[in-house]
Image (cartoon, rainbow, N blue to C red):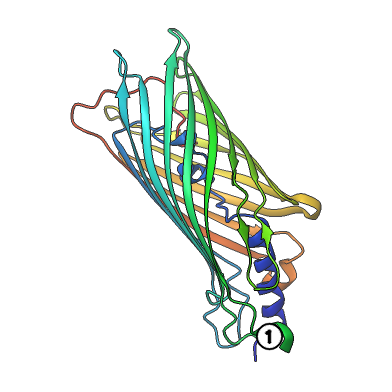
Amino acid sequence: MKKVLYLIVLLAGAIGLRAQDPHFSQYHMMPVYLNPAMTGFFEGDARFGFMYRRQWFTVGSPHGGTKYETYGAYVDGDIRLGKRKQDYLGIGGSFVRDGAGDQALTLTDGIISVAYSKAFGYHVKHSIAVGLAGEIMFKQFRNGNALFPTPIAESIGKLNMALDATVGIRYNVDFKKRVSMYLGFAYAHVSQPKESFSDVSSERLASKFVGHGGAVIAIKNRWNLVPTVLFMAQGPSFQANVGAAGQLLFGERYNSINSFTFGFNARFGGQEGGDALIPNVRLDYRQVSLGVAYDINVSNLRRASNTVGAIEIGVIYIYKKKKYVPKTNVSCAQW
């Protein structure tokens, strides 16, 4: 028989997943999933990314094996437009798989996104993009060995499939590479599809509002300051993630920035207040980026999890042709 604590955390996770989509602490390393207007917004011809997140790994069944895991992967690229090849049509796809409690509660999400970006400005470079994404979602709760009151035990376990859409916008400005910043907004779950885990009740998935931004500010010599911010609201759930990092540039390479970034973020959530403190590091070398973050749980669940939150690892690879023509207004695309 599973521990009472495990059952409580599992049910809390089930409720949370229905109220709020899976999220990543290093959201800037999964930009296509965050906002379709970020599709194609990078220096290169093609971008490939992968994310892995494991949380609450001190909580589980007495036999071990309990997992709260999220996987994410994406690929995107662009088709250059206009005489100067600074405008582009971005095309991409992403995939997210989330499992909670021995895979008892699962979400599988496949997304196709497109974005159109228009560049303007001479001394100060600007660009604005609009994006659209279509997705197909599968959610299911498998009761497995869990024990429930007799009247509801047999009615739980229905597979939900839904088609949905997201729209987004992104604005970027580059002040001669001294300060580069972007702001984005996305409106997800436009259709608010119905979902149900039983035959006796159903509800609509709440729409999600996302606001996010980042900047790269040149401080001195090879040092940059990188502030980031994210706000998300979905139904009764609210999340804010704010932080900053120091970035050290090293080496020299044509059309490539080598850097080591280390910073700290704080995540807040609704009425609960503080959720997690997130130290993070990132290495960018040539076309490869590797990021690691660790969530220190400071929410009401810290007693059950021994303050353990989540470990998260992200990898990005950017492919560039030998005769690559750089864009002039994406210098902080990955933040």
Seen in the image, is 302 located left or right of residue 331? right
Residue placed farthest to the right in the image?
271
Residue 274 picture location, percent across and down: 75, 52
Q: Is residue 217 visible?
A: no
Seen in the image, is 160 located left or right of residue 127? right
The residue nearer to you, when weighing 174 against 145, is 145
Q: Please give the name of the residue rendered at 69% of the width and 65% of the height, measured from the top-left corner.
A: 15
Q: Please give the name of the residue rendered at 63% of the width and 75% of the height, measured from the top-left corner.
A: 59
Q: In which quarter of the view is residue 157 placed?
A: bottom right
Seen in the image, is 218 located left or right of residue 241? left
The residue nearer to you, when weighing 218 against 181, is 181
Q: Please give the name of the residue rendered at 54% of the width and 83% of the height, measured from the top-left corner.
A: 64
Residue 228 picture location, percent across and down: 59, 36
Residue 160 picture location, percent across and down: 55, 65
Q: Quadrant of the N terminus?
A: bottom right
Q: In which quarter of the view is residue 190 placed?
A: top right
Q: Is residue 247 visible?
A: yes
Q: Which residue is mark 1?
A: 3
310 w.r.t. 144: above or below = above
Q: Please give the name of the residue rendered at 25% of the width and 35% of the height, measured from the top-left corner.
A: 320
Residue 247 picture location, percent across and down: 49, 35
The residue nearer to you, when weighing 54 against 10, is 10
Looking at the picture, which amino acid does disc 1 mark?
Lys
278 w.r.t. 142: above or below = above
Residue placed farthest to the bottom in the image?
1
Residue placed farthest to the left in the image?
322
| Residue neighbourhood size for the residue with mark 1, other residues' Cα within 10 Å, grouped as few (<14), some (14–19), many (≥20) | few
Residue placed farthest to the front in the image?
200
Callout 1: SS: loop
182 w.r.t. 158: above or below = above
The number of numbered badges drawn on the structure is 1
